[in-house]
Image: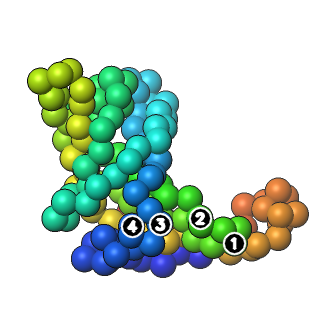
Amino acid sequence: MSIPVEIDDLEKTIDRYGAVAYLVTTNDDYHPHITHVAVSVQSKELICKVGRKTSLNASVRPSVAMLWPPEKPNDYSLIVDGSMQVTEAPDGSFEGTFLPLSAILHRPASTSVDDLVDECASDCLSILEK
C-alpha cells in the first residue's frame, strides 16, 4: 500500500521518522550502493555527509533514493526519490545536497509473514514513475 507524500509535507514527515536514513546510489555497473546517512533539512533540500564511493556514484548518476524504515512492524517506510549534487569541502569530505522529486509512504498490502514469503503481496509503485 502506498500513500503519496507531498514535497511540501516532506519536512514534517521526516521529523516523524528522524534524521537517519539510507541513501541508495548505483555504481558504474548499476549495482546498488546503500549507505547510512544523517540528514538535515534546509529549505526543500536534504543535506548529508557522504563517503567517497557514494560521492562518485551520485556525481556520475545523480538520480538517487532515500529510505527511512518503518518505526515499528506493519508500519510504513518513507521512500523519497530525487537528484543529488555533491560538493567537496576543503578538508576533503563530501556533502550531498538532495533535491526530492517525489515521496511515498509504503508497506506491504499483506501483514502476514507467510504471505510475504510465498509471493510479493504488495501494491508498491516505482519511485521513478510519476
Pick whichever of labels 3 and 1 is earlier in the sequence.
3
- Amino acid type at circle 3 is Tyr
Q: CA distance from mark 2 to mark 4?
A: 12 Å
What's the mark number on residue 70? Answer: 2
For numbered disc 1, what is the local secondary structure?
Answer: loop
Q: Is residue 67 left or right of residue 15?
A: right
Residue at which label 1 appears: 74
Q: Are marks 2 and 1 in contact (CB under 8 Å)?
A: yes
Pick whichever of labels 3 and 2 is earlier in the sequence.
3
Q: Nearer the viewer, mark 3 or mark 1?
A: 3
Q: Nearer the viewer, mark 3 or mark 2?
A: 3
Residue at which label 4 appears: 14
- Amino acid type at circle 4 is Ile
Residue at which label 3 appears: 17
Q: Is residue 19 left or right of residue 117?
A: left
Residue 8: horizontal and vertical position, in percent? 25, 77
What's the mark number on residue 30? Answer: none
Which residue is depicted at the point 29% across and 55% down?
Answer: 40
Residue 20: horizontal and vertical position, in percent? 44, 52
Determine whether 85 is above or below 105 in the image: above
Neighbour class for label 4 at 10 Å: few (<14), some, many (≥20)? some
Which residue is depicted at the point 30% across and 45% down?
Answer: 48
Q: CA distance from mark 3 to mark 1?
A: 15 Å
Residue 4: horizontal and vertical position, in percent? 42, 77
